[in-house]
Amino acid sequence: MLSVTHLTLQDVHHILDLAADLEAEPVLSRAQRLLKRRVALLFYESSTRTRTSFELAAKSLGADTVLVSALSSSIEKGESLKDTGITLRALGAECIILRHPSSGAPYLLAQATQLPILNAGDGIHEHPSQALLDLRTILTRRLGAKQAQSATAQTLAGLTITIVGDIFHSRVARSNALLLPRLGARVVLCGPEPLLPESAAAIGPNLVIDRNLDRALAQSDVVMMLRIQKERLSGLRLDLEDYIARYQLDAARLAAHAPKALVLHPGPMIRGLELTSEVADGPQSAVAEQVHHGLAIRMALLARALEATKTSTNKTKATVKTVKKSTRR
Amino acid sequence: MTAFLIRGGRLIDPARNIDTAQDVFLRDGRVAAVEVPGKLDALATQEHAEIIAAKGLVVAPGLVDIHVHLREPGQGYKETIATGTAAAAAGGFTSVCAMPNTIPVNDSVETTRWMQEPERGAVARVFPIAAATRGSMGEAITEYGSLKSAGAVAVSDDGKPILQDVVMHQVLAAAARAGLPVIQHAEDTRQTQGASMNAGALAFRLGLRGMAAEAESTIVERDIQLLAGLHDSRAHLHVAHLSTAKALDAVRRARRNGLHVTCEVAPHHFALTEEAVGDYDTHAKMSPPLRLQADRAALTEGLLDGTVDAIATDHAPHAIHEKEQEFERAPNGILGLETALGLSLLLLQQKHSMPLSRVISLLSAQPAQVLHLTGRGTLAVGSFADLVLFDPAEMWMYRAAESKSKSRNTPFDGWTLPGRVHLTISEGRIVHDARVRAKR
């Protein structure tokens, strides 16, 4: 799973369905699903939520996990992504969860290892599992837990979802902007020019830009706030005072323009910058729920990545190997 | 054997407006005679010349590439002068102009001479292009007079544009005095920091920082202004690997105003668009980047209407491990020498009905003229015995694995192209011979 654009709506439905099943499954039976399967977490960037969430998801399905991070491995000595991937595969990894500062890095790893790769965020490109957990959060809140498995072109029809802030540097924004409109949502992108170039609206259907937060809020059923990614600004100067004045979501603004909207944030939040504590901890906030849904979604993604190969008996495994060999020739 | 008779072929020599059945006699590295078919047979017998059967083939001047990176000195693991010129010969090229971004940068008489020494094992003539500024740092200009005497045919800081107006002004003025063209890699690097493909919606979707067309066109416009301000008719600006409609328009306007501005276009820019980046294919990463369909169409139009002076490959070899990296980390550039003729025939002759002699002109006579390579790019009597024999209709498949280059970085691997090269002769020596396969 490298990009949400690789998922059909049927895939999305399947993932949501599986997430619900796994969440409901008794702990001991669930732990048989991927018993002793080997999952590697390869993290070139720091992470709290995503890493822990993927790790707990893998463990609750019974898998063995190993964490490799850039600073405590041979990556520091200059080993390439390709060689790191090949090494992990040789150690028995059957699936690699990759977080990497370069957009597109998971494509390279997938090509080099031929293993299922779960993109846990690549540069400023995508963060597909985040978009799926955001979708599950929205569906659960809007349609109730029982309907949260629906994924058709109409599922989010009539819903306006606004993504606010540093869209340019946000892989979460890209994955959501590429996924949600396919389920019928209208997505509004809101932010200042340097953080939201005009070309952003051209990446898919049902995307519009509105640079005025109050106006955008007034249309919104869901508001997704983003952090300003200081580590990726690379020379871009931003007047934070001005940014806060124009784009911070505070209680007054929310009450005035979107009193019923659901507030999301992929984290990490910088309270006092893109949103205030009142909003983050307020009744409209679903931030903690997002994290909770992340676990179920990531269990589903791991099961989907690994069960496809597990169901194959030794015999079919052998044929898979011969096919691989013959394509290599 | 020092004499050859190229017999029975269709001679296309655009410099002299010739496209007809003629035989060519080569002696001691020069074209000795060009006559109607059969008329040179007696001379050939008399001089025991080797007869080269050219029936069904086009006989054209050896192709001239005014923009290649041969990587020597300093980066022999990517390419050497020997392997780079072998790739040139395989592609029908007999003259190549080598950019100075070697290690060290070719900003000296010593390096310029070293590159031309027979010990380098070149099988095509190498014309060094010297650095316009010391170390290509864009500050102190180099010694143009002595560099020219040592064999440099132009000055350029290719890969590193000359950004400072004052410096570019000095470069244009000094080069004009020395009688050297200035080749500019037009890219305002202040606008392209961290960028790795064309700017726009696709770059945004892929999460890659983009290079805007304006980063190219503003430098071209600035250079044209500086050139106009010189009021020196000897001053000559040549725009390297022009890639955008905007920059092409600037060149067109400058020419209309009587300025000596020329430009080249690389085959990949009229063959591909940014879509080729696909799933982060580093073989579609180069600078300037692949652009939009509108740019590609404008470049094709410029080639057809004569605004573009030359096709140049920007042949830029990189080792496998360098290209097998994260897209943003991989170096810019692709191979070009072996596919230039085929791509030009496919996209200009076959797709846009450009006359064959025009395609050949853009690959030989015109680039030779841009850099004043006397005796190259033509088969007039007295010129160098540089020629290529190819069948413009014969389809062949380009396989990167079989490339004569040391590197494999090409987006055209597996492409079927017209115009298989049968034979390349450089200064009277057979340097590429693929006739055996043809006979089978």
Image: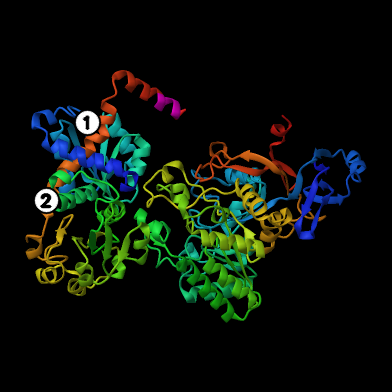
- Is there CB contact under 8 Å for labels 2 and 1? no
Task: Name the disc covering residue B90, or none.
Answer: none
Would you place residue A142 above or below residue A308 in this image? Answer: below
Dot 2 or dot 1: first in sequence order is 1
Magenta segment range? A323-327
Q: Quadrant of the C terminus of chain B?
A: top right
Q: Residue at x 51, y 42 (%)?
A: B407
Quadrant position of the N terminus of chain B in the picture: top right
Tag 1 secondary structure? strand
The amino acid pointed to by label 1 is: Arg
Q: Secondary structure at mark 2?
A: helix
Q: Circle 2: is it few (<14), some (14-19), or many (20+) Cα within 10 Å?
A: some
Residue B279 point in image, percent of width and height: 40, 47
Residue at (48% x, 77% y) in the render: B166
Q: Which residue is mark 2?
A: A289
Q: Is residue A11 magenta?
A: no
Counting from the top left corner in percent of width and height, residue A229 is at 23, 60
Main secondary structure along the magenta-highlighted residues: helix
Mark 1 residue crowding within 10 angstroms, few (<14) / some (14–19) / many (20+): many
Q: Quadrant of residue A28?
A: top left
Furthest-top residue in this view? A315
Chain ID at mark 1: A
Relative placement, left or right, of A189 versus B40 is left
CA gap between label 2 and label 1 equals: 28 Å
| Rendered view: A172 above or below B148 | above
The residue under label 2 is which amino acid type?
Answer: Glu
Q: Is residue A87 above or below residue A121?
A: above
Q: Chain of mark 2?
A: A
The residue singled out by tag 1 in the image is A38
